């Protein structure tokens, strides 16, 4: 359950959209903490802070911070989000830090009129990935093929709930048409109740040519076939097709992951696309495949080909596009060179999606 601590802000470290990293003194020791400023306000040196230290004590690789629950002596006002909290959409529902936000399609929203009757994605390509780390690589592939494309990111709630946790997303903001946070996730430019309404908001409110769907940073997994939050990517394929979009699957391919179940095509991709997705997607692989993993990938593709379209995308130029990415690439602690096949596959999916956008 929650592991509580009380501490004092010793120093302000780096900050990005919606988040402030702190050094906090707790019981004579200094720990790294994270405050979501739209929720708790702006901390100052000397402020007393109430912390949840569970992730820190567990040593989680993605979320190993003490999280600021409140600044008890410096509580914020009620209008931190400049009107966004005047809506009726409740996220992180019935938890002590539930956030009440403006839904993109609720009555008071400026997008209400356009979204009230929206029911179709007009063939918009949607790239689906099971890990947040694929986001910048997919974007790099899109931009390499079609630099002027408007790209939206739809963040699902399988990983981090606040979009503010992602430094990657903050740095990519100038390169995106906007972010939609769906389900229990929150903090995007637009808020949506479901993946379906989030996709429609990306298309009709943000004017996206291409949308990327992936969970926030981190994920929940038990090491079993079904116990992984990213399996929901298969459900997202069904949502895209239900709404008349064009589903493009970014397969999780690795030649570096030491776990056999993730070598070649990850068993999570095989489950999501082979068992959960009931409608077809374009499953993209770079051509040529890295020789170190080619046989394993081809075996996995044969298992998926009955339901999906296997698309082989030329890999030329994608390495350069990945190296020009405006944010560092990292998945499970491995950078571009350490897990090249993973990022190359994501970029190939982005390139394919961009090729589906109408126009010159």
Image: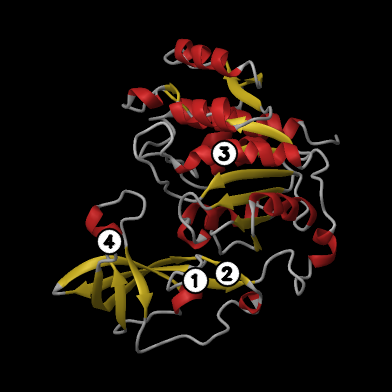
Q: Residues within 10 Å of mark 3 (few under 14, many from 20)?
A: many
Q: Where is residue 212 drawn, in percent x and y?
A: 63, 43
Mark 2 vs mark 4: in front: 2
Residues under numbered marks 2 and 1 in contact, where contact means CB atoms less than 8 Å apart: yes
Q: Which residue is mark 1?
A: 98
Return the residue nearer the eye: 220 or 19: 220
Q: Where is residue 307 drawn, in percent x and y?
A: 65, 21
Q: Is residue 294 left or right of residue 111?
A: left
Q: Is residue 26 left or right of residue 73?
A: left
Q: Residues within 10 Å of mark 2 (few under 14, many from 20)?
A: some
Please identify the quarter of the rendering in which residue 353 is found.
top right
Q: Residue 90 shows which numbered tag?
A: 2
The quadrant of the image that shows the C terminus is: top right
Q: Where is residue 165 drawn, in percent x and y?
A: 46, 59
Mark 1 or mark 3, earlier in chain: 1
Mark 4 vs mark 1: in front: 1
């Amino acid at each position: 359950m929650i592991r509580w601590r009380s501490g004092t802000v010793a120093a302000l470290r780096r900050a990005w959209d919606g988040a402030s990293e702190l050094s906090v003194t707790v019981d004579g020791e200094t720990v790294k903490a994270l405050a979501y400023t739209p929720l708790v306000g702006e901390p100052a040196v000397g402020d007393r802070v109430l912390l949840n230290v569970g992730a820190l004590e567990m040593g989680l690789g993605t979320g190993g911070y003490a999280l600021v629950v409140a600044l008890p002596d410096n509580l914020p006002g009620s209008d931190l989000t400049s009107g966004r909290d005047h809506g009726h959409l409740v996220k992180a529902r019935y938890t002590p830090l539930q956030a009440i936000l403006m839904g993109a399609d609720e009555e008071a929203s400026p997008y209400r009129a356009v979204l009230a009757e929206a029911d179709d994605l007009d063939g918009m390509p949607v790239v689906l990935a099971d890990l947040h780390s694929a986001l910048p690589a997919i974007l790099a592939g899109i931009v390499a093929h079609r630099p002027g494309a408007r790209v939206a990111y739809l963040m699902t709630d399988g990983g981090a709930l606040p979009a503010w946790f992602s430094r990657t997303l903050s740095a990519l903001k100038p390169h995106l048409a906007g972010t939609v946070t769906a389900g229990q996730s929150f903090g995007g430019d637009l808020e949506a109740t479901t993946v379906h309404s989030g996709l429609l908001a990306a298309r009709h409110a943000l004017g996206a040519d291409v949308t990327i769907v992936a969970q926030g940073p981190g994920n929940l997994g038990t090491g079993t076939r079904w116990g992984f939050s990213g399996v929901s990517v298969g459900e997202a394929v069904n949502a895209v097709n239900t709404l008349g979009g064009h589903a493009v699957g970014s397969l999780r391919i690795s030649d570096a992951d030491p776990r056999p179940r993730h070598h070649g095509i990850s068993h999570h991709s095989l489950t999501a696309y082979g068992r959960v997705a009931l409608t077809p997607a374009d499953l993209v692989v770079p051509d040529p495949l890295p020789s170190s993993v080619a046989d394993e990938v081809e075996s996995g593709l044969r298992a998926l080909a009955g339901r999906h379209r296997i698309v082989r995308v030329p890999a030329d130029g994608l390495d350069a596009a990945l190296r020009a990415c405006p944010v560092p690439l990292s998945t499970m602690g491995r950078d571009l060179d350490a897990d090249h096949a993973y990022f190359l596959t994501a970029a190939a999916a982005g390139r394919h999606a961009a090729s589906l956008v109408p126009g010159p």
